[in-house]
Every structure is written in C-alpha cells, then in structure tokens.
Amino acid sequence: MTRRQPREPVRRSTRIRQKTSPYFALKGDKAKQPTASIDRHRASARSVKTASKAEQVGAVKVKQRKSSSTRTRKIKAEEQTDTPLIAEAERVHGLPRQVNFYGLIQEIVTPNVFRLLVATCLLNQTKGRAAMPVFWELLRRWPDEHHLAKADVVEVTDLLQPIGLHNIRARRLISMAQTMVEIPYDESNSFKSRDRTAPDTPIGIYPGVGRYAIDSWRIFVAGGGARVGLQGDKPVSPFDVAMPKDEPAMPRLSPPCIAVQQQQQQPEWKSVMPLDKELRAYLIWRWAKEGQVWDPLRGIVSAQSDPP
C-alpha cells in the first residue's frame, strides 16, 4: 500500500491582513481628513458644554440678583413702616383687647341674638377682617330682623358679594329674619338643632343656625353669658356709638332672671366644648380668669396658682 503523503498546512488567507482601513492606507492630505472631522466634532461638543455651563452660571447670577433685590425691598419696607403691629382684634372691629375683653365680635353684639346670628353667618368660612365691614353695613341698612325680613334679596346679595357665598348667605339671612319675626326669640324655648352634635336651644329653629352659632349662643348669651363674673364695663361697638340717641335700646336679660338661673345650675358656657378655634381660645382665656386650666378636648385639666 502506498502511503498517503501528509497534506500541506492550510495557509490562512492573506486578504484579512491586507484588508486594512483605507483611512490608514492612504497617505498625504487625504489621510488627515477624518482626523480633522473628528476634531471638529470634539471642538463643537466642547463649545456646547462651555456654553451650557455659561448659561447655568448666568441663570444662577440672575436668581441671586432677584433674591437680593427682593430682600432689599423687604428691608426698606420694614424700615419705612415704623408703626407697631395692630392686634388682630383691633383690626377686626376697631376695639383693642382689654383685661376683661378678649376681642371677639360675639362679646360686643350680645345679648342681641339677631346680631349674633348674622355675625356667625358671615364669619363662617370667612375671616373677620373681611366680614366685619360687611356686617356693620348690613346692620346700618337693616338694623333688626323686621327690616331684614322685608329686604330685597338682590340688594343683600350685592352687599355680601365681596366675602363670597353671597347667593346662599343672602337667602339664608332673609329666611332667618322672617322666621324670627314669625317665631320671636325666647330663651325659654327649646328647638332641636339640625346639627346632631349640638343640643336643643332656642335658636335651633332658625335657618342657617349650625354648630358655630349654637356654641356662640351658649357661651355669650345663655344665662347671661360668660360675661357674668367679669369686672369692668363691656366695650361698646362702633355701631352702637353711631346710633341715634332717640332709637330704643336693644332688649337685655334682666338681672333677677340671670341670678335665678345661676343659683339653679352652673353657667352654660362652662359645659361648652366648641369646635371653632376662636371660641376655644376664648374659653381658655375665660377659664384662666376662673383660675382653671382648660383644654379644648379634655375640659378642665388643673388649677392655676394665681389667676390673672
């Protein structure tokens, strides 16, 4: 047998080694063209980054200038305003807070129930600074429930327009006044409230009377109100000062009736747990006059060593 001769090693193709990029095979100016294009791209990218950084720095400087100018304007405004800050109570109704006057509008208008209900209707969901000018103007045009019951709903709506909810409030106030004319207020009456969390009161039958109005009545009107026991005279509202002298005074509770009620049971205001923050603040202040520390959620907590 003839032996097979070994095969020669297979030579690898030289095409792979010869197949090189034309960018490296060329010489002269043509080989520099791709490099120049790459350099141009890199240079443009650097310029874009530099421009974006410059824009960011410029935006930061603009913000700093604006903030500094705003601070400067605020400082100048504070320097120009040399008058002291006016208390919130004085901004609302023009009467400063006193030793025995906390500063709520309910303290001024009571024991007039009509004014109390109108004030609570306007103060509900509205700040006192916005509601009080409208309140005094409403009393000037319709000083009692008899006048307001005959008022034009369009005129009342226009008056209440600046404080919002004017359509609902106008109809509600007129309906309340008409009901007060038909069923006059009497403290001996007791009507179920529309709010299930509120007790029966003489004002529960009137439209628009909710928890805020009932709590205000219980604190400032029932049994003479929380005013009983405080020393000093009650402040007079600007509306009463401007009233003609020949106009009859508003009805007030007689002292004997108040004295009998106080002997029979404790004052009504001591059992009220209001939800409104202003009424809560008033009761904290009023209980402090009694030498007690009162909590809006727990009631009386402890006794003070020295009542104010």
Image: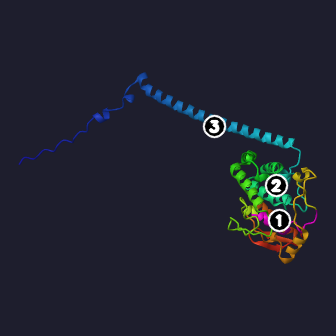
Is residue 280 visible to us here?
no
Can residue 92 be seen from the camera position used here? yes
Residue at the disc numbered 3: 56
Res. 284 mark: none
Lower sequence index among marks 2 and 3: 3
- Check disc 2 and give the amino acid type: Asp
- Distance from the alpha carbon under mark 2 to that under mark 1: 17 Å
| Residue 4 pos. (x, y %) | 11, 46
Residue drawn at (82%, 74%) of the image: 302
User: 158 above or below 247?
Assistant: above
Report helix, strand or loop for mark 1.
Answer: loop
Circle 2 sits on which residue? 144
Judging by the rendered image, the residue that carries numbered circle 1 is 221
Q: Is residue 259 above or below residue 54?
A: below
Residue 154 % position (x, y)? 72, 45
Residue 219 falls inside the magenta stretch: yes
Mark toward the start of the polypeptide (2 vs 1): 2
Q: Of tags 2 and 3, which is closer to the observer? A: 2
> Given the current orientation, which residue lies at the most extreme left position?
1
Q: Which residues are magenta?
A: 214-232
Three-letter residue code for mark 1? Val
Q: Is residue 253 located in the magenta-colored stretch of the structure?
A: no
* Residue depicted at 83% across the width and 75% down the height: 266
Rendering coords of residue 201 (x, y %)? 75, 68
Image depth: mark 3 or mark 1 in front: 1
Q: How many marks?
A: 3
Picture quadrant of residue 18 = top left
Of residues 133 and 231, the one nearer the viewer is 133
Secondary structure beneath disc 3? helix
